[in-house]
Amino acid sequence: MDGVETSDATWADVDVKDEEAMSRLSWDERLDARVLAPAHPGGARYRLFIVVLGTIVAWGFVAFVYQLKDGLYVTDMRDRISWGLYIAALIFFMGISMAGTFISAILRAASADWRTPITRMAEAVTVAALISGALFIIVDMGRPDRLYNFYFYGNWQSPMMWDMIAITIYLTASVTFLLVPMVPDLAYFRDRLNGRVARWRILVYDSLALGWEGNERQHREIHKAIGVLMIVIIPVAASVHTMLAWIFATTSRVSWDSTILGLFFVTGAMYSGIATVIILLAVVRRVYHLEEYITPRHFKNLAYLMAAGAVLMLYGNASEYIPKGFKMDEEEAHAFRQLFVEDFAPFFWFYFFGGLVFPVLVIAFKRTRTIPGLVIASIFVNVGMFIERYFIVVAGLRVPLLDYEPSSYSPTWVEWSIFASGCAGFTLLITLFTRVFPILSVWEMKEEHEYGEPSPVPVEEGSPA
Amino acid sequence: MPKYSMAVDLERCQGCRACMTACKVENNTVVSNNWMYVFRFEEGSYPETEMSFLPRQCQHCDNAPCAKVCPVGARFKREDGIVLTDSDRCIGCRYCELACPYGVNYYNWQKPEKGQYDIVDWHDDDIQSATGGAIPPYRNPDLDELYGEEQRRTAGGGHAKGVIEKCTFCVHRVEKGLDPACADTCPTDALIFGDIEDPESPISLYLKDQSPWQLLEEAGTKPNVYYIGGKPPNKELKEIERPKATV
């Protein structure tokens, strides 16, 4: 494999928690030990974690069945405010799914060499978030059994149809973008774990490894494939978030009537996506002892990107609210009043100070720019962004178009249960992924270690630098 | 091909809401789903107040935002101008509800027997003796028929859970050459229905010397409901009451 000679059992004999023993291994062997360790059966805490997540997911499923039986009446959505928590969750998870594309594809395209160890996790976040998000479409539908109507009777004029197409393409593209760069690592897992883990897993690795042997031609092909994929996936990801925004921007509701809404959604997606990856990296780094590969440098660089995201969000908000507020027509005045001083003021100001200003401050000061500090900032970013999605949907619907009294909405236990289930499902997917698949891009890291520099563009293999 | 439209003479409307009741009886709609709704507004402060009324049903727009955004073409506009919902095709996404600036879409949030009749225990013996055991006790069979060239189930049917519905201009009556129930019932003839492209139709004759206005004209939806007299709703008007039911 990749010309790396290893005495077969070294990585398996060493306890990854034993730093002393680990430090005696060579760089390659140490990486083997670290990456292959999670593939082994987890301990009691791991099993408990899975059971807890599984229970929350199952509870959400029970709530969904109850909702199917009694109709969406069990939610607090009614005819005035007819979209709520589910749609906010849909936008939120779709936003998180920007992470993989941004960190993996954009940084790849920009030849940012530091991204190598974190790309795999980012790509996994994309797929898990997309699956979790897409399920909220089904949850929000009155007749989920008629989902096939999108295919049989699709109305090309409808922005929702555009979004369905964009989501379908993005799901396909992001699964491909997760699997293709993983091919050499799957072959590596197949070879190293053969006989050590359940047979079905070896079959999965083998079938997904697509006959990878690591020869020169295959190396050339995979670099070419990744090069094409990373360019293709960027516009696809941008289109998903733009279409999602256009679902709102194409209606005549005042709060959504904005030309920058698409751009704003893309920015918000990038912002919360990076925050999610920071949280995940901190957890994975600690749980799987990957301190050597996921370093404070990664957190610092991601934090700077996140700060840039926050600034773009602030800029987006300013360009949205200042020109509109300057004119302040009647509907706008109503929208502003409820957002800034009335019903939604706690939400908005939490988003503003907690979700945008606070993270930037944490990142700005060296003393707070630690890994725990950044994780706290990232949690604030995600909560803030979720709240932002929530008030975009609900406050936008609350502005009456005719002069009737505005309605109110507060999610019921069914909605909260299904939302919690979505979050737990997302975490569960990621957890299982880290247990079954290589969480670092091992072959790329080894390549970089060997040649001393990354190979972001197709290189002629066998000609060491 | 006719083009069906309605004129609403606000000078004649007395806010009795007989049209709302007629609509409910005819279309058998769920509690608080008022396909036809009459706003009652108040202007000024006591004792110098003035009341005004605004019947508001689906405007059957020529440039209907609901039909444009429907992802599966369940909401569509017929050749004769009536905007309808195919309840066999609707997926219940409620996007039409967001897109419509008039707020005339009603979603069936729960099972029809609950939404319509849950106010009474229909399994009660005394009630069963009166209804003959039927639940729901009344259903207009015309609403379940297929209409138009498209032959789609568009008249509202059984108000099935999980689909959207709205005013149909009483398509099942129009197909028989009758006026919609609201126009038929209005005691002051404030609602005039007809083919606006036929210069001899009652609505064309009625609108001839009038200067009608349309609701939210600036939204560019090109509605087919024409208002005469009165004035468009504005911030000076206060809604007197809201529908009480919470479905």
Image (cartoon, rainbow, N blue to C red):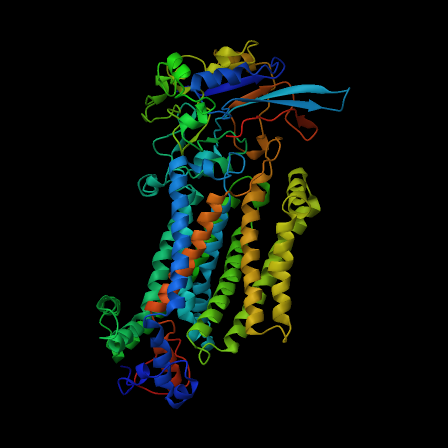
In terms of image quadrants, where is residue A106? bottom left
Q: The N terminus of chain A is located in which quarter?
A: bottom left
Q: Name the residue nearer the viewer: B212 or A126.
A: A126
- Rendering coords of residue A74 (x, y %): 46, 38
Instruction: Give coordinates of residue B62: x percent, y percent.
Output: 47, 29
Quadrant where the image shows the C terminus of chain A: bottom left
Q: How many marks?
A: 0
Instruction: Name the residue at 52% across, 77% down.
Output: A296
Residue at 37% in and 70% down: A43
Q: Residue A207 location, x and y as percent?
A: 23, 67
Q: Nearer the viewer, residue B225 or A388?
A: A388
| Along the line of sight, the residue nearer the viewer: A126 or A296 | A296
Q: Residue furthest top?
A: B187
Picture coordinates of residue A335, whole percent (x, y): 64, 42
Whether residue A82 is visible: yes
Q: Quadrant of residue B176?
A: top left
Identify which residue, B190 or B182, lies in the foreground. B182
Vertical relation: A313 (above or below) A44: above
Compared with A157, B24 (above or below) is above
* Residue A166 visible in this rendered orientation of the protein: no
